[in-house]
Image (spheres, helix red, strand yellow):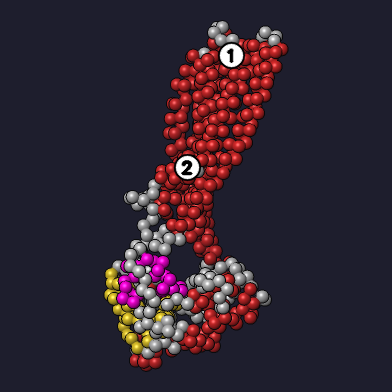
């Protein structure tokens, strides 16, 4: 996670907490009312028992005994009913708040303007959307407990004031300092909880990163280094978790010791008053019962204090993502209708690109060759408007992409990255994911990408369900299915990066021959070094050191340009 907190003007951790509570206002209020009623009944139980002793046992009155026993039974009926319903509403509020936060995080991560994933591993984002969202949701669950505990303390203080003014004042004057001390004690827990979640999110991100690249690691024999990396990350996460757990234990133990001393003082004062005859035996029993009852509200406040401390730390982490500045800004111009597909790059400088000028005619099939993978990646990011160039402009039909909404740009220009993932679904569903039309015929896209051969080799054809990220397929098969998905979308402009690096030469030649027919009349840009694909293009641009070094047909460049030959034919 980036350090320094959310940018100025963006959501803060406090705002995240307030929104979570406001969104669950009705269940929180309902649970609070029921919880306070439950605690009120709990506090009245020792008071009623004291009245039973003074008015029934001491006097020998059977009628009074029956009357107060019925009152006691009514209290237990009300408190048990309120407890069940309050618990249901409380848990619902917590789950609802966590769910809403996950929705907000998903909306921010999927925002077409991007920026939320900058500097963050996918596994780290997942950890925030699960663990941190749950902890913030727990604040919505904890608030009714806090209010009900405070109600219990207030009612106990009133009851003790009725029994004895010194006892009541002891509670009223003693509770605020205890709460303040509890807040001070919770600060180390908050800091260490944030560090714990930070390390846990990083460990999750590293684990997801290693799992996704497991085959590559095995292929290059880098498994020991990867294991060492994860072991170190996991140790750091464990150390942070142990420090947070130690803080929680110290926090809970310290609060429990303070409350225990406070309750003991109440009991001793009550016993002293009874010995002096200031209060009756029933009042003493009620006072001792109230002192014992007070342990419950204090334990609740201890629990709530810890939940709030951890919730504040998680809310700060969530706010960092929600407040992430967008990678691009939405423009206000309309997308040209219909989209002809003319692309122009004028003086584009971004990353490895240095003043790139390209003019791609509508409906043409164009190749772009570069030996630098970073330059290819930066070109794709600019064409898909995942980033805006530091200098220069990219135009679609004469309109700068910066003047268009990112969603509109991506409807007109589809950038198919080399490392595109497949979904855990049928092969046909993966291909149809690129089409807006449900039930559309995918046979042309399957044939042009040679993915029909992949389907024929599978046990259930196009209905065969692929495993996560398509790992049940070979590298070449995954590439063909991903290419079929891009072709099925049928955008006015299609940009494809190295779609056949893992495909055999015969299949690659077949794809090259069919690609022009399927994309006829629509602009297609192939960022590749494949001679088979480049041979079928109308024109090829050669990028060298981030600049356009040559332009011409594939045969012309192969015969006259040494850098081109070394990049394509070596």
Q: Badge 1 is on which residue? A: 283
Tag 2 or tag 1, which sits nearer the N-term? 2
* Residue 324: image location, x then y, percent: 38, 55
Residue placed at 31% from the left, 83% from the top? 549
Quadrant in the rendering for residue 359: bottom left
| Res. 320 visible in picture | yes
* Residue 525: image location, x then y, percent: 41, 80
Say what secondary structure mark 1 lies in: helix
Q: Badge 2 is on which residue? A: 21
Evaluate if marks 1 and 2 touch, with contact meaning CB atoms under 8 Å apart.
no
Quadrant in the rendering for residue 328: bottom left
Q: Does the magenta-highlighted stretch encompass residue 393?
A: no
Residue placed at 41% from the left, 73% from the top? 412
Residue placed at 49% from the left, 78% from the top? 487
Q: Does the magenta-highlighted stretch encompass residue 400?
A: yes
Foreground: 569 or 6?
A: 6
Say what secondary structure mark 2 lies in: helix
* Residue 346: image location, x then y, percent: 29, 76
Instruction: Mark 2: give few (<14), some (14-19) or many (20+) Cα within 10 Å.
Output: many
Q: Quadrant of the C terminus?
A: bottom left
Residue placed at 59% from the left, 14% from the top? 284
Instruction: Please give the label number shown on residue 484.
Output: none
Per the rendered image, the range of residues in magenta is 395-417
User: What residue occupies the far top of the structure in this picture?
Assistant: 277
Foreground: 195 or 526?
A: 526
* Residue 221: image location, x then y, percent: 54, 70
Instruction: Mark 1: give few (<14), some (14-19) or many (20+) Cα within 10 Å.
Output: many
| Res. 120 visible in picture | no
Foreground: 78 or 511?
A: 78
Q: CA distance from mark 1 to mark 2?
A: 40 Å
- Please tell me whether residue 44 is drawn above or below residue 12 in the rendered image: above
The mark tally for this picture is 2
């Amino acid at each position: 996670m980036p350090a320094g907190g959310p940018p100025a003007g963006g959501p803060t951790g406090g705002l995240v907490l307030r929104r979570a509570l406001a969104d669950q206002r009705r269940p929180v209020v309902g649970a609070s009312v029921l919880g306070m009623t439950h605690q009120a009944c709990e506090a009245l139980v020792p008071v009623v028992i004291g009245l039973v002793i003074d008015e029934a046992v001491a006097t020998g009155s059977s009628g009074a005994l029956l009357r107060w026993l019925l009152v006691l039974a009514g209290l237990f009926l009300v408190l048990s009913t309120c407890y069940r319903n309050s618990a249901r509403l409380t848990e619902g509020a917590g789950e609802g708040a966590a769910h809403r936060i996950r929705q907000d995080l998903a909306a921010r991560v999927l925002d077409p303007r991007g920026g939320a994933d900058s500097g963050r591993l996918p596994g780290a984002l997942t950890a925030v959307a699960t663990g941190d969202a749950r902890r913030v949701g727990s604040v919505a669950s904890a608030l009714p407990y806090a209010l009900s505990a405070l109600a219990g303390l207030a009612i106990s203080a009133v009851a003790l004031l009725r029994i004895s003014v010194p006892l009541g004042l002891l509670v009223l004057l003693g509770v605020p300092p205890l709460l303040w001390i509890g807040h001070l004690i919770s600060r180390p827990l908050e800091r260490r909880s944030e560090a714990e979640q930070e390390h846990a999110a990083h460990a999750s991100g590293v684990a997801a990163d290693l799992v996704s690249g497991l085959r590559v690691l095995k292929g290059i024999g880098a498994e020991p280094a990867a294991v060492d990396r994860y072991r170190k990350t996991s140790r750091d996460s464990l150390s942070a978790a142990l420090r947070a757990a130690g803080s929680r234990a110290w926090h809970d133990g310290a609060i429990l010791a303070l409350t225990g001393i406070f309750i003991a003082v109440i009991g001793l004062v009550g016993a002293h008053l009874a010995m002096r005859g200031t209060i009756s035996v029933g009042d003493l029993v009620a006072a001792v019962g109230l002192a014992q009852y007070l342990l419950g509200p204090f334990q609740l406040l201890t629990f709530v204090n810890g939940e709030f401390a951890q919730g504040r730390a998680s809310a700060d982490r969530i706010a960092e993502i929600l407040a992430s500045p967008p990678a691009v800004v939405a423009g206000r111009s309309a997308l040209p209708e219909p989209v002809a597909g003319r692309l122009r790059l004028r003086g584009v400088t971004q990353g490895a690109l240095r003043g790139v000028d390209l003019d791609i005619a509508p409906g043409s099939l164009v190749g772009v060759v570069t030996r630098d993978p970073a330059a290819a990646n930066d070109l794709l990011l600019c064409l898909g408007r995942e980033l805006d160039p530091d200098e220069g402009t990219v135009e679609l039909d004469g309109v700068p992409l910066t003047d268009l909404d990112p969603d509109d740009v991506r409807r007109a220009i589809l950038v198919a990255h080399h490392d595109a993932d497949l979904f855990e679904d049928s092969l046909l569903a993966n291909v149809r994911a690129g089409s807006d039309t449900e039930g559309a015929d995918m046979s042309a896209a399957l044939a042009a990408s040679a993915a029909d051969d992949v389907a024929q080799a599978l046990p259930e054809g196009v209905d065969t369900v692929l495993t996560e990220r398509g790992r049940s397929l070979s590298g070449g098969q995954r590439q063909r299915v991903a290419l079929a998905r891009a072709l099925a979308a049928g955008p006015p402009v299609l940009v494809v990066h190295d779609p056949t690096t893992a495909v055999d030469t015969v299949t690659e030649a077949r794809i090259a021959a069919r690609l022009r027919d399927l994309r006829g009349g629509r602009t297609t840009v192939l960022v590749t070094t494949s001679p088979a694909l480049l041979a079928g293009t109308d024109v090829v641009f050669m990028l060298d050191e981030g600049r356009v070094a040559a332009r011409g047909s594939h045969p012309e460049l192969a015969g006259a340009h040494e850098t081109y030959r070394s990049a394509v034919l070596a």
